[in-house]
Image (tube, helix red, strand yellow):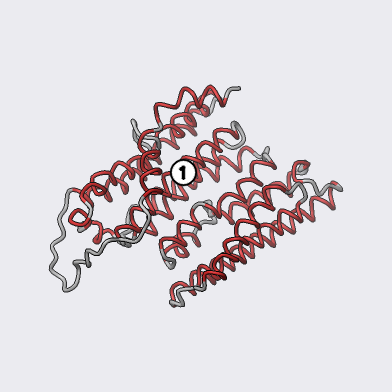
């Protein structure tokens, strides 16, 4: 792609999210989301591969549906209450509709089925943008409307953690596994949204850091399925020994960073007298942990049989910058000791 066109599209992507962040009026927020969608579509389809075009079409249709639903809900809210302000959502009908529209935008269960299919059709760089940056604007709106519909959010959260764990169990494609991992993490964030928005923000930030490092590792290895992970030890032994730790941090094992949001969320749910919800969420985390362990096992404890022609990749030096990977990997592995400082900040 022409660098000028790419720069324009990335600028549009940033501008759309920024407009949604800064808006207090529903029409402006909707406009920001639409700019965001229209800017990423050429980036998704630029490979001209049939799968990329199919993924782009699916993404466009789901995002257009969600945007239409959001516009309809905000118009309904203005009709019922006379308010276009995002923070003045008082009627339960438009609040529920907007929550479901934003759930479709970010890919929460039960409206999640587009996300694994779309992510599978994209390259890892575009997949990274879709899994991180594209979640920010809808989350900003969810945090602003602060939905009081507790049952709906808890159902969405628990369903997402369950589907995210269950769906990833049988996958061999890394991008689909990362999509289900994304659904599970979003479920944890939605679960705690109404009780502690600051904890949702913390979970979102740690998810962004961990996903960033995971995508960069797979991009550096040029891995798209589990089998290609088995030959990564010969190319990058040091990174191969660190990658299982990154994956286990995504699974939420102590003493890694990923344990922090899960720990604090379970603690908060227990304080809110929701022990059953907390127990179910903790049990669904075990499902996700299984497929992260499976990836770790494939990467470090198995050796590729190399019985197919051409499985050994060329070991050419990669042109990819390794500084972002080094920074995000360090953050993914070593931020747990900061938990007391973070909890002190959250309680201020």
- Can you give x and y, in whole percent of width and height, for residue 331 in the image? 40, 38
Residue sitting nearer the eye, 167 or 37: 37
Front in this rendered view, residue 83 or 300: 300
Q: Residue at x 33, y 56 (%)?
A: 218
The foreground one among 173 and 165 is: 173
Q: Residues within 10 Å of mark 1 (few under 14, many from 20)?
A: many
Q: Is residue 329 above or below residue 105?
A: above
188 or 7, which is in the foreground? 7
Horizontal side, residue 40 vs residue 163: left or right: right
Task: Give how far across and how far down residue 122 sits, in percent.
Answer: 44, 66
Q: Residue at x 24, y 49 (%)?
A: 240
Estimate the x, y position of residue 81 in percent, counting from the top left: 84, 46
Quarter where residue 195 is shown: top right
Q: Position of residue 9 (x, y in %)?
A: 58, 65
Q: Which residue is mark 1?
A: 207
Query: Is 279 left, or right, of 311 in this rendering?
Result: right
Q: Is residue 151 above or below residue 232?
A: above
């Amino acid at each position: 792609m022409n660098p000028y066109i790419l720069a324009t599209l990335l600028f549009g992507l940033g501008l759309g999210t920024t407009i949604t962040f800064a808006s207090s009026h529903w029409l402006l927020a909707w406009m920001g989301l639409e700019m965001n969608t229209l800017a990423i579509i050429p980036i998704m389809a630029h490979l001209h591969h049939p799968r990329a075009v199919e993924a782009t079409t699916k993404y466009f249709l789901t995002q257009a549906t969600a945007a239409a639903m959001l516009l309809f809900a905000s118009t309904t809210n203005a009709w019922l209450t006379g308010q276009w302000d995002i923070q003045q959502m008082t009627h339960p009908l438009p609040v529920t509709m907007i929550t479901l529209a934003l759930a479709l935008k970010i890919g929460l269960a039960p409206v999640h089925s587009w996300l694994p299919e779309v992510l599978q059709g994209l390259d890892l760089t575009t997949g990274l943008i879709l899994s991180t940056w594209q979640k920010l604007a809808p989350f900003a709106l969810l945090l602003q409307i602060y939905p009081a519909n507790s049952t709906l959010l808890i159902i969405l959260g628990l369903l997402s953690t369950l589907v995210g764990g269950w769906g990833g169990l049988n996958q061999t494609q890394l991008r689909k596994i990362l999509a289900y991992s994304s659904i599970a993490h979003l479920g944890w964030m939605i679960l705690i949204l109404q009780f502690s928005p600051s904890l949702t923000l913390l979970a979102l930030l740690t998810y962004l850091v961990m996903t960033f490092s995971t995508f960069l590792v797979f991009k550096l290895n040029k891995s798209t399925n589990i089998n290609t992970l088995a030959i990564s030890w010969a190319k990058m032994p040091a990174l191969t020994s660190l990658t299982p730790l990154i994956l286990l941090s995504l699974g939420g094992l102590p003493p890694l960073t990923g344990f922090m949001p899960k720990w604090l969320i379970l603690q908060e749910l227990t304080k809110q007298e929701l022990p059953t919800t907390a127990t179910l969420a903790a049990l669904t985390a075990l499902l996700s942990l299984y497929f992260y362990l499976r990836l770790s096992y494939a990467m470090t404890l198995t050796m590729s049989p190399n019985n197919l022609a051409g499985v050994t990749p060329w070991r050419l030096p990669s042109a990819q910058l390794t500084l972002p990977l080094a920074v995000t990997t360090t953050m993914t592995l070593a931020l747990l000791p900061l938990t007391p400082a973070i909890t002190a900040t959250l309680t201020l």
